[in-house]
Image (tube, coloured by chain):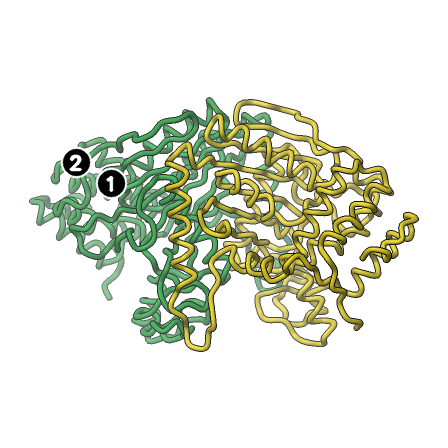
Chain colours: A green, B yellow
């Protein structure tokens, strides 16, 4: 395996944005999408970063992702808005939803923006943090195609539907959770298969629904929910919130991200903002949140443990360590260069 | 161990209500609290049912639970209301919060009621279902005293803070999750200790923070969060929502339920209602929710599995099986009779 490429995030953002503009995405939009993707690489979450770009580009070419800048408001009633994303790049409609959620939360105390016909938006946490930066509790959810069985079941019924929640804080970073409802990501199982290693119990079941530690049987089978019925239940409810409130797709009507590229992804999202200033004084809320974070970071340690991370601290520490530079795997780098070449761009000249 | 008592739920409700009225709780209030408690027994969740009554009564006597019927509204801004529960019985302020949440959600599309200085309210799921019955997504959260360490930590920092979410459905029951954020309840660990059995890995750590399968070390130690950092993160966020939005207690300022009985419990709650009719047609939402439930209930089964349960179905099936009768353990029965006797009531005459 060749070494990872160590790139300046700014140059990588420009390279990605150039690819999108070459396909007719507006310049400002292209920059936003590129920034949001590279933000995941800066957190060390490569699966949600620049490696997605070739697939995004293929989907724009095939028409399953549109060139729209914004979704269309289908219903607008006080603190409840339904957006049709029209298969626009998910980062664009996510930011539209964040702006709408904050505006309505300022007015009513809280708001929910439900989005149908959405495309992948990267990490949910990024938008939850944007809401927190505006003084709101931010909750962001999305559904995915079915990946997990109900406890005891033998067919995938719900996605590993992520939820992110972040809250405003006077600390250096927002307390944040950003989690998929599966016990582990499929990427980790693929890594174990490639390395010829077994996987821990509880990660996956084979195609008959029997729990397995064999990564190959797992890849042919299903992910298992985190904490069993708890993870399944939350994933199921997130499906009913995202798909249900938006009137959009849920269950198997959400399509595989890497499946047929001319088949719209069609996920549904929910963005909830709760304006803390409507309840208590915002500075007081933020100070209390900081105290709780500090209490966790300063926890007494179990034997053999060097440090602990408060919720959100691990990603924050990764961003700080990155210092504006991204490690991109050789495979992801080569695919990006190749995608650029196909668009007549020589990305190698600046990354 | 003597056998459980098989009691008519209605008679048990009356017996419990009589105890509360004997201590000066208003008759209607006493009935509501008794009903809500026995509802947990009818679901087979004894830990949140009639066995709590003697402790509730002791707390009323000692003054740490008040005789108030309602909480006081501290702040009221559009869809955001802060209630001071004034240490009233939690079932009463929970219902007050549910009514307020529905009223505001009808007007604005959604609403959040944050409650401080609350007492125990039983199961969160009951109030989430009440919200769902009114056509709202219902989310109910509470914090508890610290019970769990951060991953790698050696001190309890957050409670196993429960969250319940229920959504409206045209099915026989509302899709519902109702979960604490610990991998297992302390009650199960005490049962293992009593039976001389070990506990599964992942349930608990000893007082140094080292994971243990010894139930006695676990009882002296700490519960571990469900799914590790995911469960810890959600519990931490629930603390910041409940205690933070209400301006009430969080972390160690929430007191042990069975601790010093004259020390107010002082938990904080959040009730969120999202009116589905503000987003889509309510009957359509409910029909889609039913289809998803049916899809889960009809899942293909893994080898050796007889049936699966959609979220909320297990409790629903328990309620149906109960048929209005409650099995109360001999210990819980005897304590209740004894508590009645102390109040000059002969509960044996009708349960």
Secondary structure at badge 1 equals: loop
Q: How many marks?
A: 2
Crowd rating for badge 1 (residues with CA inside 10 Å; few <14, some 14–19, many 20+): many
Q: Residue furthest left?
A: A344
Give the residue at x 52% y 38%: B134
Which residue is nearer to you in this view: B142 or A20?
A: B142
Density class for disc 2 (Cα within 10 Å; few <14, some 14-19, many ≥20) is many
Q: Dividing the picture into quarters, in which one does residue A26 lie? A: top left
- Rendered residue at 88%/56% (across/down): B338
Position of residue A69 relative to residue A335, above or below, is above
Residue A199 to residue A242: above or below? below
Q: Is residue A103 left or right of residue A284?
A: left
Q: Position of residue A272 (x, y in %)?
A: 44, 36
Q: Residue at x 51, y 42 (%)?
A: B132
- Residue corresponding to mark 1: A89
Report the chain holding disc 1: A
Give me the residue at 74% from left, 54% from top: B50
The answer to whether one can see residue A107 in this image is yes
Residue A168 drawn above or below residue B292: above
**Residue B256: numbered disc:** none
In terms of secondary structure, where does tag 2 sit? loop
Determine which of the numbered discs, if any, sits on residue A25 in the image: 2
Quadrant location of the N terminus of chain A in the rendered image: bottom left
Given residues A177 and B271, the one toward you in this image is: B271
Picture coordinates of residue A123 (x, y %)? 36, 46
Out of B294 and B231, give the one closest to the viewer: B294
The answer to whether residue A319 is visible is: no
Labelled pair 2, 1 in contact (Cβ < 8 Å): yes
Asked whether the residues under marks 2 and 1 belong to the same chain, the reply is yes
Q: Position of residue A12 (x, y in %)?
A: 24, 44
Image location (x, y in percent) of residue A254: 29, 51
Subunit under mark 2: A
């Amino acid at each position: 395996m060749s070494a990872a490429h160590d790139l300046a995030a700014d140059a990588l953002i420009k390279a990605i944005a150039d690819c999108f503009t070459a396909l007719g995405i507006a310049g400002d939009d292209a920059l936003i999408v590129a920034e949001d993707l590279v933000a995941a690489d800066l957190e060390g979450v490569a699966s949600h970063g620049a490696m997605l770009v070739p697939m995004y580009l293929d989907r724009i070419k095939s028409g399953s992702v549109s060139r729209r800048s914004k979704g269309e408001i289908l219903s607008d009633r006080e603190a409840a808005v339904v957006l049709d994303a029209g298969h626009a790049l998910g980062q664009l409609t996510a930011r539209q939803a964040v702006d709408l959620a904050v505006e309505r939360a300022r007015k009513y105390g809280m708001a929910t923006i439900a989005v149908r016909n959405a495309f992948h938006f990267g990490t949910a946490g990024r938008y939850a943090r944007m809401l927190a930066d505006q003084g709101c509790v931010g909750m962001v959810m999305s559904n995915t195609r079915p990946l997990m069985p109900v406890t005891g079941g033998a067919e995938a019924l719900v996605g590993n539907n992520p939820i992110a929640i972040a809250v405003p804080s006077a600390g250096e970073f927002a307390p944040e959770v950003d989690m998929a409802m599966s016990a582990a990501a499929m990427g980790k199982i693929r890594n174990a298969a490639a390395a010829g290693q077994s996987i821990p119990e509880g990660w996956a079941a084979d195609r008959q629904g029997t729990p397995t530690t064999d990564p190959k049987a797992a890849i042919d089978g299903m992910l298992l929910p985190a904490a069993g019925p708890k993870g399944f239940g939350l994933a199921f409810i997130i499906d009913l919130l995202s798909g249900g409130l938006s009137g959009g797709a849920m269950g198997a009507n959400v399509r595989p991200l890497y499946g047929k590229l001319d088949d719209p992804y069609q996920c549904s999202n929910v963005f909830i903002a709760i304006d803390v200033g409507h309840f208590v004084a915002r500075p007081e809320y933020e100070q209390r949140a900081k105290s709780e974070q500090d209490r966790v970071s300063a926890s007494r340690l179990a034997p053999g443990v060097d440090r602990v991370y408060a919720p959100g601290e691990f990603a924050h520490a990764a961003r700080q360590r990155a210092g504006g530079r991204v490690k991109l795997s050789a495979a992801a780098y080569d695919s990006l260069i190749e995608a650029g070449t196909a668009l007549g761009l020589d990305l190698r000249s600046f990354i």
